C-alpha cells in the first residue's frame, strides 16, 4: 500500500498537483473502461443514447397504433358496434405528453400552463 501511495505522490508531483487530460484518459482506459465494457456485455446491450431509445419507442408506438386501427377496421366488417367501442377506447386512452405529465404540487409557472385556444362565439343579432 505504501508503495502505491508513493507512486501516486510522484505522479502528482510531476504534474504539479494538476492531472493532465491525457493521463486521465489513459487511467480511464486502463482501469474503468474494461469494467464498463464487461457490464455492457453482461447486460446484453451496447451503449445506446437515450435519444435513440426514445425515437425507437415512438416509432413502435405509432406502429402499434396503426395495427390497432387496422384490426378495428377488420372487426367493423362483422361487428360494427364492438368496433366502435374499441375505436373510442383506443382514442380515449391514448397516451400523450399531456396525459402522462405529472402535475406538480405547486403553483404553475406561466410557461408551464397549457395553452387553450377559445374562439369567440358568433353573435346573432
Image: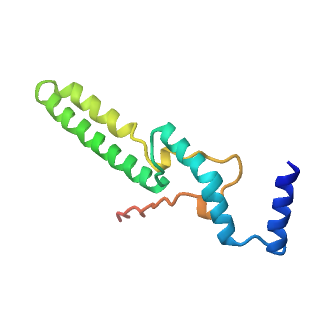
When the figure is inspected, residue 85 is found, relative to residue 51, above or below; the finding is: above
* In the foreground, 44 or 85: 44
Across and down, in percent, residue 32 comes to 63, 52
Residue that sits furthest to the front in the current view:
3
Residue that sits furthest to the left in the current view:
77
Across and down, in percent, residue 54 comes to 44, 51
* In the foreground, 20 or 59: 20
Across and down, in percent, residue 49 comes to 48, 55
Residue at x 63%, y 65% (from the top left corner): 25
* In the foreground, 39 or 70: 39
Residue at x 58%, y 53% (from the top left corner): 33
When the figure is inspected, residue 106 is found, relative to residue 75, above or below; the finding is: below
Residue at x 35%, y 63% (from the top left corner): 124
* Res. 109 visible in picture: no
* Res. 90 visible in picture: yes
Coloring scheme used? rainbow
Locate the C terminus and report the quarter of the image it occupies: bottom left
Residue 73 occupies quadrant: top left
Across and down, in percent, residue 51 comes to 46, 56
Amino acid at each position: 500500500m505504501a508503495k502505491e501511495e508513493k507512486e501516486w505522490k510522484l505522479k502528482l508531483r510531476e504534474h504539479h498537483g494538476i492531472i493532465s487530460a491525457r493521463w486521465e484518459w489513459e487511467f480511464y482506459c486502463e482501469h474503468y473502461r474494461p469494467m464498463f465494457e464487461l457490464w455492457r456485455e453482461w447486460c446484453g446491450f451496447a451503449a445506446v443514447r437515450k435519444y435513440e431509445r426514445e425515437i425507437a419507442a415512438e416509432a413502435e408506438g405509432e406502429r402499434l397504433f396503426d395495427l390497432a386501427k387496422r384490426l378495428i377496421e377488420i372487426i367493423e366488417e362483422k361487428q360494427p358496434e364492438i368496433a366502435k367501442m374499441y375505436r373510442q377506447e383506443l382514442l380515449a386512452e391514448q397516451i400523450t405528453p399531456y396525459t402522462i405529465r405529472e402535475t406538480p404540487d405547486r403553483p404553475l409557472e406561466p410557461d408551464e400552463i397549457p395553452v387553450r385556444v377559445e374562439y369567440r362565439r358568433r353573435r346573432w343579432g
